[in-house]
Amino acid sequence: MAAEPPLAGPNTLDTPLLTLPEPPPRTPPATLRQVSHGRLSVHDYTGAEPRHCPHPTLKAGMRCPLCERGSLYREAPKQQVQLHGHAPVSALCWQVEVLRCSACKAVFNARDSQGKYDVSVSTAIVLSRYYLGLPFYRLEAFQRMLGVPLPDATQWELARALFETVFPVIAHLIHLAAQADLLYMDDTGGRILSLIRENRTLPAGARYGIHSTGIVSVGEQVIVLYFTGRAHAGENLDKLLDLREADRQVPIHMADASSSNGPKRHPGKTLPVHCNAHALRKFMDIRDQFPEACDVLLGSLAAVYTIDRHTRTEGLSDAARRDHHAAHSSPLLTELKAWMEAQIADRHVEPNSALGQAMHYLLSRWERFTEFLRTPGVPLDNNWVERILKRLILQRKNSLFFHNARSAYVGCALTSLIMTAQAAGINVFDYLNALQRHRFDMARHPAEWLPWNYTQRMALTRSVAA
């Protein structure tokens, strides 16, 4: 066995190629609570295939082969996990035995053809592209390297076919999202190659923007939706409100204070509230310039977040959480508002300075920032949708763009289904496979094939078949 290379010192400019750099010093944890061995329990591997492993030569009741006095008896089975690596899509090449009758010439195959692509292939491709953000051409190169070629055009055709199969479920999720009582939403930049080319021919004053909208709908279940195109978040909210039933109460609409995040065709049809985290960031960005004033503001807002965390930990209802904030957060915020107004009125803060503008941003929208003191169910911030937008940002960083508006719709719809299933806490791979295997029943009853109830419908179809 070859000896390990010597360790290099702190100056590595002249380090020989076979000298291993020294490891960085390890910082001990501040508290014992941060100590973790980092190992996963066997119960964490919920997707592992269970296999029974009997002893090859011994059975319960036999004499012990060592002492030959006692008898063997069973104990609780030992759990062992073994992981295997392979390409996202693997292949089997069947050597099918064929028999032919010498008299009638009938042919008998040992195995009937079941199609080249199993449903799990489409699932693996879609998860690689729209969850991991792996471009089709990169997966093609990886598959070719491992001897299982999968052209990028074939990947797109399989992904598109899966979209067409599961579209009834996606359409039903969009309709359900429109009925929710709480809607988080925000935009990030989007790229669609055909629209970028179109921008070169548009006249002055035309809409050039391309937006990727994320919406988190919170009702009886959590539904995550994505849309990429010319429409910004407020226009996508209008389209969602078009599907809302007339007898529903006005939904809470959480977003930042951008004018593009509000509905235009449905004014007054939502209760708009603003994200306190955006206000916090404005003061965090200028803390080095105005440390004393920013510390006062950040300290008050941090106290409100601490109070909110307590309400979540205690599991308070929406009404009880509102009352708790009204009792404990309202005095803090009333004092903070009076202090900011006094700072500006007494000229301690220049209105046009960065601090003055940050204060004006908060004061001019004070009612929408503090609606959680008056209305049950209003969240403090829009961080939920900020987190789910990272999925589209990852795709944009890795794949750069969608080819056209259709591929953008397909990609966003599949990402919506994946992230909604993940929010439901289910095995997304098994779910997408189940939708494809039961596509005819799913097309007739999409409401019974949602991430949170599909196992009941699948069990029912199996019992009927049996």
Image: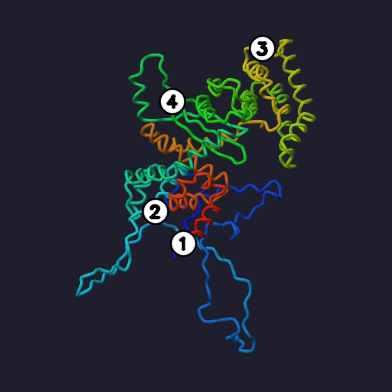
Residue 3 is tagged as 1
Q: Does label 3 or label 2 sit earlier along the sequence?
A: 2
Up-down: is 11 above or below 396? below
- How far is disc 1 from disc 4 in space, using C-alphas? 61 Å
Q: Quadrant of residue 352?
A: top right
Of mark 3 and mark 4, the one earlier in the sequence is: 4
Which residue is under mark 4? 230
Q: Residue at x 59, y 32 (%)?
A: 183
In the image, what residue type sits under mark 2? Val
Q: Is residue 256 left or right of residue 439?
A: right
The answer for how far apart the CA atoms under marks 3 and 2 are is: 62 Å
| Residue in the picture at 46% in, 46% down | 444
Q: Amino acid at mark 3?
A: Glu
Q: Residue at x 72, y 17 (%)?
A: 340
Mark 2: give few (<14), some (14-19) or many (20+) Cα within 10 Å.
Answer: some
User: Reading the chain from its start, which is encountered first: label 1 or label 3?
Assistant: 1
- Per the image, the residue denoted by label 3 is 350
| Residue bearing mark 2 | 89
Lateral position of residue 404 relative to residue 227, left or right: left
Are the two marked residues, 1 and 3, in contact with CB atoms closer than 8 angstroms? Answer: no
The outermost residue toward the bottom is: 69
Residue 464, given in percent of the width and then of the height, sits at 50, 59
Distance between the alpha carbons at the discs numbered 1 and 3: 67 Å
Q: Nearer the viewer, residue 104 or 272?
A: 104
CB within 8 Å, label 3 to label 4: no
